[in-house]
Each structure stands twice: as C-alpha cells, then as structure tokens.
Image (spheres, rainbow, N blue to C red):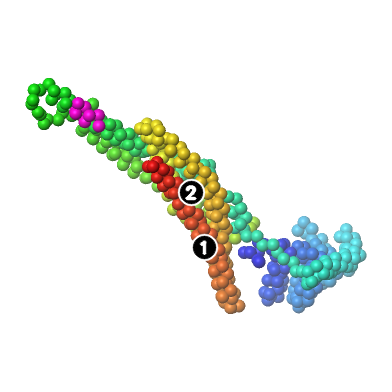
C-alpha cells in the first residue's frame, strides 16, 4: 500500500515513478537529473535501454549522471566541474583526450561488461531462489507504515509539566499566579461557609438546651405559677450569624465569577498562542516534514486536537480544579467536624486509586488507538478531493467509497470503545460508593 505522497516508497521506487510521470508528459525536451543513481545496476540498465534510448529515442534528452557506462551510447557529452564546462564532444573525442576523466572513462569501459554480467547473474539467482521457495516469482514489496502511527507511538498523558506549559501559554506568570490564588480563596470561602453553618447549628442547639434548663429552674423557685415565656440566650446574636453567612455567600459568588472570568481569559490566550505557534511552525517547516507527515495528520492537529484544546481541555481543567479543591475542602471540614469520618474516606480514596491504576493504561491505549485511526480518515478525504478528476476518469468512485467506509468504521470502533471505557469507569466508582454507603448504614 502506497501512503500519501509516497512516504512508504524507497528512493528507487520514487525515482521510477518520477521518471514515468515525465515520460507520460508529452514533451519535446526532457531534463533528467540523475534518475538512475537511486536504483540498482540491472534496473538502471533496463531504464536506460528501454526508456531513455527506446521510448524517448525521438526526443531530446538531457541526462545528468555519474554512471560512466552509459556515455558510449549517447550522442554528445558535456563534462562539467564546479559549474564550468571542461570539455564537450562525442564519446570517442573525450576518450582520446588528455584529461584525467578520459582515464577513468577507459577503465570504466573495460569493467562495464563484467559488472553488468555479475549483476544480471545475482538478480537471476535471487529470482530463482525465491521462485523455488514460494513456487512463484517474488516481487519487491514496500513496507507500509502509517505516519500517524509513528506520531502517536508515545502515550499521551496529561502530565503536570504539560498542564503547566498550557497555563503558561495563557499569559504572564503574575496572571497565572492571580488565578491560582483566586481559586484557593474561592474554595476557602466555600469551606468557610460550611464551617460557619456547622458552628451556627451548634450555637442553636446549645442555646435551646440552655433555655430548657433555665425554664425548669424558674418553675421550682416560683410557687405554683407557670410562665409561657421562653428565654433564648446565645453567645452571639442570631442576626450576626445571618450577616456573617450572607457576607461569606456573597464573597463566594464574587470570587467564583472572578475565577471564571480569569480562567476564560487564560484559556483564550493559551488557545490563540498555541495555534499561532503551531501555524508558524508549519509555515517554516522543511519539505522533509511534509514528506514524512501526511496531510491527514496535519489536518488532525489543526481540527481535532485544536478543537480539544479550545473546547474539551478548558472544561476538563476547570472541573478538575473545582472538584480537586472541593475534595480537599471537604476532607478539611470532615477532619474538623468529625475526625472519625476520615477513616472511611481514606479507604474510599485507596479503592479509587487502585481502580484508577487499572483504568489509566487501558484508556491511554484506547485513546492512542482512536488518534491513530482518525488520521487516515482526514488523509483519505483530502487525497480523494485532490484526485477527484482521476477517480472519475477511471470510475473508481465505489472503491474509494468502500475504503473511506472502512477507515470510518475503524475510527468509530475505537471511538465507541473510548466512550464505553469512560462509562465503565464511572459505573465502577458509583458501585463502590453505593456498597460502602450500604455497608455504613448496616
């Protein structure tokens, strides 16, 4: 299978394809820049005799070559060195000259027949051995390796260094520091509200208990006289508690809005800066980069991956920050209110960690597989659009449609596997919480 732009072809195969393209183009003059150097000796001889001397015998061919064995079969020879013409003439004229090149030419003429004979014998021996082993002639096959598979060979893990680089792309360090501080302050405000509610409830409970004791004591001192008046004595007034709670709630709302605003600004800046850097790198890339990376892989980076950076990553990062700080705040509140509740929380954390260790390698492999199967879809679509005229000329629409369906089916299989794996992970976490909750109630 030939990949896009012939990245799976060898140098000799590319040279033969380029020569065939030039020959198919009907022209009067052909400029051949050393097309015989990348092929074997027998292939070179075959191309020279059947293509250059045979098919193009009525055309004007300018052949640049370092192979001296073909010079005796040409009409004119131009010897050049350091962009200067040293001599021009026929094969006999150059061979009879006093140049050092003439000595090499005479030596090459003596060894040409022997080299060609040896290469022909080796080639026929190889073909005969292959025929005896397989029972049929063995053709040369190109090993096909998908560029997308090579690009995704490493497991893409959201390491802290990657997250830190993404955050730094969103602005200056003072802006990132302000965002981190406002996230911490928001969570401290939320946890402070929970602690204040717990303190307020204790105040109310202790106040009512104190009231009952005061009423019973007053009934014993008063002779037979009952009173319906209830005296509530709290260490702090109730209105003060309400005011503090309103202040804490307002602080949480304001800091949450500020946190979201700063976070959106950071993510927008990070997306634009990363897209700009990637586009600049593509514009300044060498031809080797485009020869070793398919257009589908490049389109995949600018479409799916940039879409993930613009849409999926900010949401996932915000949820991770929110729930991470919330869990830390809950653990702190639980430790302050009731220390014994930290025991089942620790057990639950260990179980979740074990499930995560089992889940993470699987989801990473599936995600990598989804990325590998997605690039051929873009590459196939792009190549089809570029060669639409040729496809219609050869009536290959059905073949291309079936190939596209096969690529899309592979990607859909990996995508649904990814969705089901995420759902299974969430199901196991819910089951663990359910059984621990039921065990605690028993």
Q: Earlier in the sequence, mark 2 or mark 1?
A: 2
Callout 1: 10 Å neighbours few (<14), some, many (20+)? some
- Quadrant of the snapshot with the N terminus: bottom right
Coordinates of residue 247 in the picture (x, y in percent): 27, 36
| The magenta stretch spans residue 51 | no
| Secondary structure category for the residue under label 2 | helix
Coordinates of residue 264 in the picture (x, y in percent): 40, 47
Coordinates of residue 118 in the picture (x, y in percent): 88, 65
Q: Is residue 229 visible?
A: yes
User: Magenta segment, principal secondary structure?
Assistant: helix
Q: Residue at x 40, y 45 (%)?
A: 438
Question: Alpha carbon of mark 2 to alpha carbon of mark 1: how far?
Answer: 31 Å
| Secondary structure category for the residue under label 1 | helix
- In-image side of 377 versus 343 (left or right): right
Check disc 2 and report the residue beneath it. Answer: 273
Q: Nearer the viewer, residue 116 or 146?
A: 146
- In-image side of 288 versus 437 (left or right): right
The disc placed on residue 34 is none
Q: Nearer the viewer, residue 34 or 343?
A: 343
- Range of magenta residues: 205-213
């Amino acid at each position: 299978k030939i990949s896009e732009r012939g990245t799976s072809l060898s140098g000799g195969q590319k040279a033969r394809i380029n020569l065939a393209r030039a020959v198919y183009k009907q022209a009067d003059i052909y400029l051949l820049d050393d097309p015989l150097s990348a092929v074997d000796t027998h292939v070179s001889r075959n191309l020279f005799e059947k293509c250059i001397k045979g098919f193009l015998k009525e055309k004007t061919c300018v052949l640049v070559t370092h192979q001296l064995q073909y010079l005796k079969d040409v009409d004119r020879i131009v010897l050049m060195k350091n962009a200067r013409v040293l001599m021009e003439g026929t094969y006999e004229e150059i061979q009879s000259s006093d140049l050092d090149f003439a000595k090499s030419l005479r030596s090459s003429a003596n060894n040409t027949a022997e080299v060609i004979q040896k290469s022909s014998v080796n080639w026929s021996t190889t073909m005969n051995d292959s025929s005896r082993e397989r029972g049929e002639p063995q053709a040369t096959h190109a090993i096909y390796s998908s560029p997308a598979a090579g690009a995704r060979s490493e497991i893409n893990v959201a390491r802290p260094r990657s997250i830190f680089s993404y955050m730094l792309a969103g602005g200056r360090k003072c802006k990132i520091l302000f965002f981190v501080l406002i996230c911490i302050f928001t969570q401290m405000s939320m946890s402070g509200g929970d602690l204040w509610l717990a303190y307020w409830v204790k105040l109310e409970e202790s106040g009512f208990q104190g009231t009952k004791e005061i009423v019973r004591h007053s009934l014993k001192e008063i002779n037979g006289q009952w009173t319906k008046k209830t005296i509530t004595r709290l260490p702090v007034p109730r209105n003060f508690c309400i005011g503090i709670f309103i202040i804490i709630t307002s602080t949480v709302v304001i800091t949450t809005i500020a946190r979201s605003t700063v976070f959106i600004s950071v993510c927008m800046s990070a997306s634009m800066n990363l897209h700009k850097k990637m586009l600049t790198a593509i514009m300044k890339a060498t031809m080797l980069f485009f020869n070793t990376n398919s257009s589908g892989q490049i389109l995949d980076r600018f479409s799916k991956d940039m879409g993930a950076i613009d849409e999926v990553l900010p949401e996932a990062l915000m949820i991770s920050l929110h729930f991470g700080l919330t869990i830390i705040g809950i653990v702190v509140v639980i430790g302050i209110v009731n220390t014994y509740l930290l025991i089942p929380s620790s057990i639950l954390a260990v179980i979740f960690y074990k499930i995560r260790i089992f889940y993470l390698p699987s989801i990473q492999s599936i995600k990598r597989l989804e990325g590998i199967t997605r690039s051929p879809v873009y590459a196939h679509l792009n190549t089809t659009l570029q060669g639409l005229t040729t496809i219609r000329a050869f009536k290959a629409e059905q073949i291309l449609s079936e190939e596209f369906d096969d690529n899309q089916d592979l990607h859909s299989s990996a995508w649904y596997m990814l969705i089901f794996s995420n759902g299974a992970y969430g199901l196991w976490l819910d089951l663990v919480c359910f059984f621990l909750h039921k065990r605690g109630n028993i």
